[in-house]
Amino acid sequence: MPAKDLGAKHVCFKCATKFYDLRKPEAICPKCGADQKDSPANRPTPEPRRGRLAAVPRPVEPAPPEPVEPEEAEEAEDVETFDDDDAVTPDDED
């Protein structure tokens, strides 16, 4: 029999035996009896697990500028000035 008539060539995923499937619908290893459809290589790759999405930072609105209040100028006028001439010294108490 030529090699074309033996079917597809397989390598068992359990025992690494090389064999032909002899054109049978199921490729079963003649040495260990493993069905080659159960091979991990034939399973679809699972989709990668996705973690939670990162929180999108909200834009920070700039604070409105604080208005300059005229109270500062008024406070300066209310303050009494104190001169050195008005100071009471211990000699003046008599």
Image: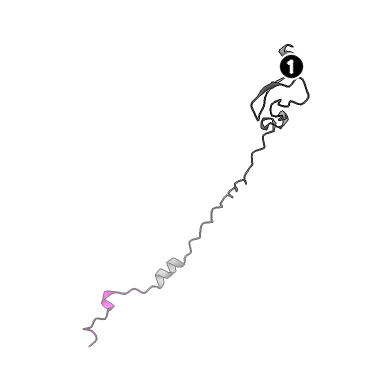
Residue occupying image coordinates x 78% and y 22%: 24
Q: Quadrant of residue 22?
A: top right
Q: Amino acid at mark 1?
A: Leu
Q: Position of residue 30 (x, y in %)?
A: 71, 25
- Which of 83 and 57 lies nearest the eye of the viewer? 57
Q: Position of residue 57 (x, y in %)?
A: 58, 49
Q: Quadrant of residue 39?
A: top right
Q: Position of residue 38 (x, y in %)?
A: 71, 32
Q: Residue furthest right?
A: 25
Residue 92 forms part of the magenta stretch:
yes
Residue 53 forms part of the magenta stretch:
no
Residue occupying image coordinates x 69% and y 21%: 19
Category of crowding for the residue at label 1, using alpha-carbon neighbours closer than 10 angstroms: few (below 14), some (14–19), many (at least 20): some
Residue named by callout 1: 6
Which quadrant holds the N terminus? Answer: top right
Q: Which residues are magenta?
A: 80-93
